Image (cartoon, grey):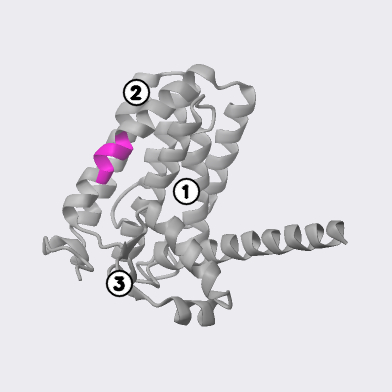
Amino acid sequence: MESQFSQAGAKTQADARTQTDAAYAALRAAILSCRLEPGAKIKINDAAAEFEFSPGAVREALSRLAAERMAVATAQKGFTVAAISAEELIDLTKTRIAIEQLCLRSAIARGDVEWEAGILAAFHRLHRLPIGVRAEPHLNPAWSAAHNAYHAALASACDSRWMLTIREMLYAQSERYRNLSKIARPGRDVDAEHKGLLDACLARDAATACKRIEAHLTRTMEILLASPRLSAGRRVGRM
């Protein structure tokens, strides 16, 4: 009997973890895509009904998102989507440049032929996808996914798990700004920028790769700062 109860308890805990993970993924995707906009209040019961998860799973998921600064927990008020601002974007970009450069230096020093094959494949996939969706200014979701995979591939040979984890968190925060601005980089040869990064990495030229990633991310920041949602210089989503 004890064994049966023990097994049942373990299964219940595993199911709860699975549901929490699923709720986390769904809410994170809604925040990153800006379907849940900055400053929006997230009512646990409403979110549970919409996403078809238990309120407990949603609460746990929101606690994880708060730890990642995607959401904000306020005593007696519950959770809201984290606000954004021009000032934060500038700070975020500077920090991301520093971390991306550290990751690139390590990856270039340690990367083997499998790493080279991986970044070539990731670039080829990204290169073949259109950035925009038809005549609209919105980014192509398939391109966005390939873009994420390409930058992750460049850094993948880095020997620090912590740096890679921080890099991923910073990248996600940057995507929230990109998706909120809803622009597809008009008049910019992003493909050439990505090819330049690839060439520097394959040449094992860390100094050039670091200069190019700084220029690449700075240009994205400048475009985002000029977008209507940020150019007014006000905080978006302030409660």
Mark 1 touching mark 2, by CB under 8 A? no
Above/below status of 5 relative to 170 = below
Task: Mark 3: give few (<14), some (14-19) or many (20+) Cα within 10 Å.
Answer: few
Residue type of the residue flagged with mark 3:
Gln
Q: Secondary structure at mark 2?
A: helix
The residue mark sitting in front, 1 or 3, is 3
Which residue is disc 3 drawn over?
76
Q: CA distance from mark 1 to mark 3?
A: 39 Å
Sequence-first disc among 1 and 3: 3
Which residue is disc 2 drawn over?
208
Residue range in magenta is 92-97
Above/below status of 30 relative to 165 = below
Task: Tell me if 204 is positioned left or right of 120 in this view.
Answer: left
Above/below status of 119 relative to 8 = above
Residue type of the residue flagged with mark 1:
His
Task: Tell me if 162 is positioned left or right of 5 in this view.
Answer: left
Sequence-first disc among 2 and 3: 3
* Whole-percent x, y for residue 162 in the image: 46, 33
| Magenta-colored stretch includes residue 85 | no
Answer yes or no: is residue 154 visible. Answer: yes
Quadrant in the picture for the N terminus: bottom right
Sequence-first disc among 1 and 2: 1
Answer yes or no: is residue 222 visible. Answer: no
Who's the residue at 35% across and 33% down the image? 99
Above/below status of 150 relative to 85 = above
Nearer to me, 216 or 22 = 22
Who's the residue at 30% across and 72% down the image? 76
